[in-house]
Image (cartoon, rainbow, N blue to C red):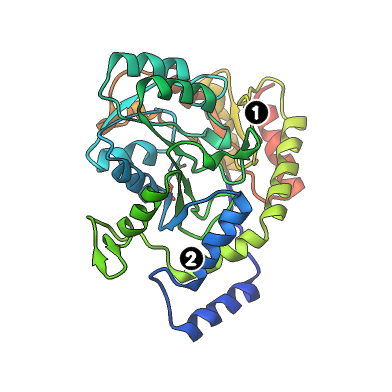
Amino acid sequence: MINVTEPHLPDKVKYQAYVDRIYKAKRLTNNGPLVEELRQRLEKHLKVKNLLLVTNGTIAIQIALKLLGSKKVLTTPFSFVATASAPSWEGCDVEFSDINLSTFNIDPVEILKKVKANSEIDCVLPVHVFGNPCEISEIEKIQEIYGFNIIYDAAHAFDVIYREQSVLSYGDISTISFHATKLFHSVEGGALIIKDDELFKKAKALINFGYDGGEIISIGINAKMSEFHAAMGLCVLDDIDFIKSKREELFFEYKKKLSSKLSYQDFCIDGSNNFSYFPVVFSDPCILLKVIKALNEENIFPRRYFYPSLSDICYLNYGDFKNSEFLSERILCLPIYPSLELDQQNKIIKIVNDCLI
Ligand SMILES: Cc1ncc(COP(=O)(O)O)c(C=O)c1O
């Protein structure tokens, strides 16, 4: 069976050595030494400051919203459901703003229209879809005039650069997911990268029931990463160059051999690609369904990522967003992961191309 992705499993002996350290220290959680080691290594690797590890990328968004006191959130309808369910769960009003059909990201022109029309929007939550950096400088120009906060959902954007800096260093807060399916993972996990030092201090308490030292300073929740998850993160981080280069090879192989009838996401010229996904767009939804059927018959399972458009989900049904809905009907992510072999990839390419003749 070939799935859209397969988690990278690092060397077991190396992981075991970390587990031995955990057993020896008898410290399983509560900001233990491995969590701190991973936090510091990630800050160094990504060249960011104020990185806070948490249990997943969804709670990272929830904590970001809580920290900024957001009430009315403008986000994209073309994302994984967590982007919109996290603010809804936090009791925020959620509004959508349509995407650009080339970049698949929220369109700054649409953001401007929305914030002009609704002065209550206090937070804009764009997503760097499939690791493609948003039009950050355009969004920041609008922020300067209208004064909302920005939280970037950078769940897909590990190791992505925008204008010579980690894309995670933009926005008031960026959040990321370290779920097992991501480029870099800690089985489950996530992080916040927080611009303001005071807010970072507050966030540390917020993820630990509101405790700062021995004292409760605010309302809090439990979002602490465990030592076992940090151990996996430390092992995967050692392999990150290998993971990226294998994905890059597969990415360009697809591009070279797939039919010219497909179209692709336009990547930001000021940014880098981390090759975490391989999305293709079909001109006709019927052909997409034909391709899925043909692949499934061979035990190959691509993913309709993201489908449906979030604007079509029952509790988020806030209107029509034609670009998001158009793309959702036509997009498919093909398998891409380091252990995918060339003959497996060639088989996928042949099936897709045959359906397009
Ligand atoms: C865009 C986006 N945001 C948020 C999340 C949530 O991350 P997690 O699964 O770590 O909670 C995901 C997960 O895939 C995602 O794709």
Where's ligand 1: which quadrant? top left
Residue 188 % position (x, y)? 46, 58
In this rendering, is residue 227 above or below 340?
Answer: below
Residue at screen point 50% across, 26% down: 105
Residue that badge 1 annotates: 270
Residue 156 % position (x, y)? 53, 42
Give the mark toward the camera: 1 or 2: 1
Label 1: few (<14), some or many (≥20) within 10 Å?
Answer: few
**The residue tagged with tag 2: helix, strand or loop?**
helix
User: Amino acid under label 2?
Assistant: His
**The residue tagged with tag 1: helix, strand or loop?**
loop
Relative to the observer, which residue lies in front, 258 or 94? Answer: 94
Quick check: can you spot residue 147? yes
Residue 154 % position (x, y)? 49, 41
Q: Which quadrant of the figure has residue 272? A: top right
Single out the residue that lies furthest toward the bottom. Answer: 24
Q: Badges 1 and 2: C-beta atoms under 8 Å apart?
A: no
Compare marks 1 and 2 and give the one earlier in the sequence: 2
Residue that badge 2 annotates: 229
